[in-house]
Image (cartoon, rainbow, N blue to C red):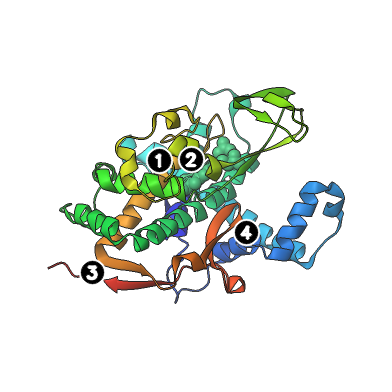
C-alpha cells in the first residue's frame, strides 16, 4: 500500500502493488531486484564499504541489478518527460493554481522551470531523475515497516488497541482528511510511541568532514582507566548514530523505556527535550540539515493506515512475541526467530471487527 501511495503522491505513477491479478509491474520488479538483497549480497555490500577493492569483483547479481537500473532509468525518463509536458500544459490552461497537479515530481519540475531563477540554480535532468529512486526507497518500506511494528505493539496490548479503536470510531466519516487524522490525540500518541520503541531505521551513518571533538554529557572511563569528557574524531572517520539506542535510553526515558506506553507522551520526560531530533523528542527521523524530509507525510500516512485497519479488524499475535525478532538492513523488519530463512513476516490472527 505504501508503494502505491508514494507512486501516486510522488510521481503520478500507478504501481498497483496490492492487485495480485495485475500484470507484474515493471518498475516494481526492478525496484525489488535492486533493493531486496540476499544475505550474500549484504556481505558483499559491507566488504565494498570496508575496502573499495571489492568493487572490482563482479557478482551475477550485479548484472541483474544493472538491468533493473536500466529499466528504472527508462521509466524515470518517461515519467519526467510526461511530467514536464503536463506542467507546461497546466501552466497554460489552468489558471487556478490549486487545481494544478501536485505530485512531488510535478512540483519539482514546476519549481525547476519557474521563470526568474538563475540558470545555474536549475537542476539538470539527471539530478531530477535521481530523486525518483530516492523517494521510492526512502518513502516506502520505512512507513510500511513502521505500521507493521505499530500493529505488533497493539496486538500485544488489547486495552490500548480497544482504546484506540474507540477513538477512531468517534470520527464520523470513513475518509477523514489529514487535519481530522492529526486531531486524534490517542492515535497521535500511539504513532509517537511506535516510532520511539520500534524505530524503522535503527542507526544511520555519517562521515566527519572535519576533525572534531564531541562533548560527552557524562565522563567515560576507558579500559586503561583514563577518564574522557569528549570523544575526538578525525576528518573522514565514519560515525554511527544509534537512533534506537537514544530512543530507548533508560537515563532519558526511565526504567520502562522499552515498554510500549502511548500515554508517556502526555508528559514526556524533561531530559528527552535535549534530543536533537527533528520530530517529537526522538531520533527516529534524525536531525539537522539532512533529517528526513518526508516525516510529516509518513506520519499522516501511518495514521490513515491505522485508522482503516484498527476500525475494521482486531489484531492478535499468532506466535509468542519473543519468537519475533528484528533484523536490520537499513530498515529493521520482523522475522521468526526459529525460521529466519522464511523471510520477513509477522504472523497475526486478524478478525473482522463488528461494531454493535
Ligand atoms: C516512518 C517512516 C520514515 C522513517 C523512519 C524515515 C527515516 C529517515 C532517516 C533516518 C533519514 C536520514 C537518512 C540518512 O541521512 O542517511 C531519512 C531521510 C530521508 N527521508 Fe525519510 N523516513 C521515513 C519516511 C519517509 C517518507 C514517507 C519519505 C518521502 C515521502 C521520506 C523521504 C526521505 C528523504 C528524501 C530523505 C533524504 C533527505 C536528505 O538526505 O536530505 N522518508 N528518513
Q: CA distance from mark 2 to mark 4?
A: 34 Å
Numbered label attached to residue 35: 4
Q: CA distance from mark 2 to mark 3?
A: 37 Å
Q: Is mark 3 within 8 Å of ligand 1?
A: no
Give the residue furthest to the bottom. Answer: 21
Numbered label attached to residue 44: none
Which of the two discs, 2 and 3, labels the residue nearer the N terminus? 2
Depth order, front residue of 136/269? 269
Numbered label attached to residue 250: 2
Name the image quarter holding the C terminus. Answer: bottom left
Q: Is residue 154 left or right of residue 128?
A: left
Numbered label attached to residue 353: 3
Where is 324 relative to 111, above or below? below
Residue at image position (49%, 31%) is 275
Where is 295 relative to 43, above or below? above
Where is 268 relative to 176, above or below? above
SS class, disc 1: helix
Name the image quarter holding the N terminus. Answer: bottom left
Numbered label attached to residue 296: 1
SS class, disc 4: helix
Give the residue furthest to the front. Answer: 225
Q: CA distance from mark 4 to mark 1?
A: 24 Å
Q: Is residue 148 left or right of residue 244?
A: left
SS class, disc 2: helix
Which of the two discs, 3 and 4, labels the residue nearer the N terminus? 4
Which of the two discs, 1 and 3, labels the residue nearer the N terminus? 1
Depth order, front residue of 247/137? 247
Q: Is residue 7 left or right of residue 316?
A: right
Which of the two discs, 2 and 4, labels the residue nearer the N terminus? 4
Amino acid at each position: 500500500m505504501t508503494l502505491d501511495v508514494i507512486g501516486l503522491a510522488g510521481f503520478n505513477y500507478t504501481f498497483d502493488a496490492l492487485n495480485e491479478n495485475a500484470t507484474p509491474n515493471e518498475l516494481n520488479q526492478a525496484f525489488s531486484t535492486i533493493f531486496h538483497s540476499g544475505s550474500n549480497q549484504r556481505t558483499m555490500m559491507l566488504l565494498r564499504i570496508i575496502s573499495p577493492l571489492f568493487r572490482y569483483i563482479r557478482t551475477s547479481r550485479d548484472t541483474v541489478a544493472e538491468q533493473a537500473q536500466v529499466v528504472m532509468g527508462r521509466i524515470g525518463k518517461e515519467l519526467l518527460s510526461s511530467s514536464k509536458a503536463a506542467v507546461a500544459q497546466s501552466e497554460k490552461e489552468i489558471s487556478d493554481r490549486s487545481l494544478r497537479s501536485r505530485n512531488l515530481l510535478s512540483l519539482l519540475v514546476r519549481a525547476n522551470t519557474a521563470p526568474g531563477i538563475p540558470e545555474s540554480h536549475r537542476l539538470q535532468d539527471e539530478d531530477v531523475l535521481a530523486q525518483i529512486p530516492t523517494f521510492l526507497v526512502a518513502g516506502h518500506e520505512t512507513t510500511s515497516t513502521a505500521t507493521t511494528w505499530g500493529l505488533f505493539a497493539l496486538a500485544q496490548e488489547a486495552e490500548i488497541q480497544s482504546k484506540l479503536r474507540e477513538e477512531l470510531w468517534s470520527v464520523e466519516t470513513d475518509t477523514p482528511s489529514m487535519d481530522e487524522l492529526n486531531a486524534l490525540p490517542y492515535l497521535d500518541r500511539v504513532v509517537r510511541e511506535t516510532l520511539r520503541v520500534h524505530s524503522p531505521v535503527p542507526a544511520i551513518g555519517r562521515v566527519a568532514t572535519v576533525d572534531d571533538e564531541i562533548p560527552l554529557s557524562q565522563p567515560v572511563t576507558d579500559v586503561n582507566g583514563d577518564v574522557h569528557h569528549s570523544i575526538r574524531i578525525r576528518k573522514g572517520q565514519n560515525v554511527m548514530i544509534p537512533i534506537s539506542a537514544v530512543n530507548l535510553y533508560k537515563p532519558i526515558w526511565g526504567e520502562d523505556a522499552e515498554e510500549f506506553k502511548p500515554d508517556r507522551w502526555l508528559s514526556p520526560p524533561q531530559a528527552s527535550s535535549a534530543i536533537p531530533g527533528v520530530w517529537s523528542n526522538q531520533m527516529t527521523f534524525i536531525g539537522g540539515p539532512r533529517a528526513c524530509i518526508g516525516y510529516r507525510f509518513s506520519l499522516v500516512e501511518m495514521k490513515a493506515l491505522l485508522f482503516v485497519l484498527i476500525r475494521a479488524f482486531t489484531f492478535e499475535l499468532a506466535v509468542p512475541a519473543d519468537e519475533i525478532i528484528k533484523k536490520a538492513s537499513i530498515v529493521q523488519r520482523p522475522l521468526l526467530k526459529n525460521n529466519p530463512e522464511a523471510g520477513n513476516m509477522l504472523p497475526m490472527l486478524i478478525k473482522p471487527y463488528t461494531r454493535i
